[in-house]
Image (cartoon, rainbow, N blue to C red):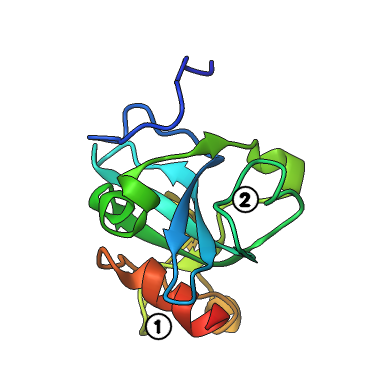
Amino acid sequence: MMRKVSYPFSPKSNTYLMPGQFWAIPLGTNKFACGRVIQVSKEDKRGFLAGLMDWVGEYPPTAERIAGTKTLKQGDVHIKTIHETGLEGMILGYRPLEEDGIEPYFFKSQEGFADDCILMKGYQEIRPVTKEEWGKYPTFSTWGYLVIKNLAEEYFM
């Protein structure tokens, strides 16, 4: 069930976050990148899986402007990521991920292969990863507050 949310808003926890919400990431070039909520953590009330969108524009993102874009990277972030990187620290709007075919990435749970290395889809643990597929997936990582902005600047500046 979708919660009633008014935009823009500054989240204090992930209670009102929903997959598909997005925020503007101001870049040093007077342009904007876009961060998006991919999945909300059930374990950590301040955590969520964020995606850096393959989008840059002269104006902040809207649901229409980001239509059809995919994620360049996904990582586990703290709610403060939105406060530190977002335009006025706000979630600007919502666009269903399904409309753009976006899902949480598959990840391996750790960098080095071991018997306890798990295949994950976003936060969901699926099964032990096999040695054959281990090199196929990125490692699930927790990003510092500014990582998404730094990645955006690497991609778009």
Residue drawn at (54%, 52%) of the image: 60
Tell me the CA gap for discs 1 and 2: 25 Å
Q: Residues within 10 Å of mark 1 (few under 14, many from 20)?
A: some
Q: Secondary structure at mark 1?
A: loop
Q: Quadrant of residue 133 in the image?
A: bottom right
Q: Amino acid at mark 2?
A: Glu
* Residue 2 at x, y percent in the picture: 53, 18
- 95 left or right of 51? right
Q: Indicate whether 65 appears above or below 136.
A: above
Residue 103: give its label: 2
Q: Indicate whether 24 appears above or below 156.
A: above
Camera-side residue: 121 or 92? 92
Mark yes or no: residue 117 visible: no
Residue drawn at (46%, 28%) of the image: 7
Q: Amino acid at mark 1?
A: Phe
* Residue 154 at x, y percent in the picture: 48, 84
Numbered disc total: 2
* Residue 155 at x, y percent in the picture: 55, 81
Residue 147: give its label: none
Residue drawn at (71%, 40%) of the image: 98
* Residue 141 at x, y percent in the picture: 35, 69
Camera-side residue: 41 or 15? 15
Q: Indicate whether 63 appears above or below 28.
A: above
- 108 left or right of 116? right
Tag 1 residue: 113
Which of marks 2 and 1 precedes in the sequence? 2
- 96 left or right of 2? right
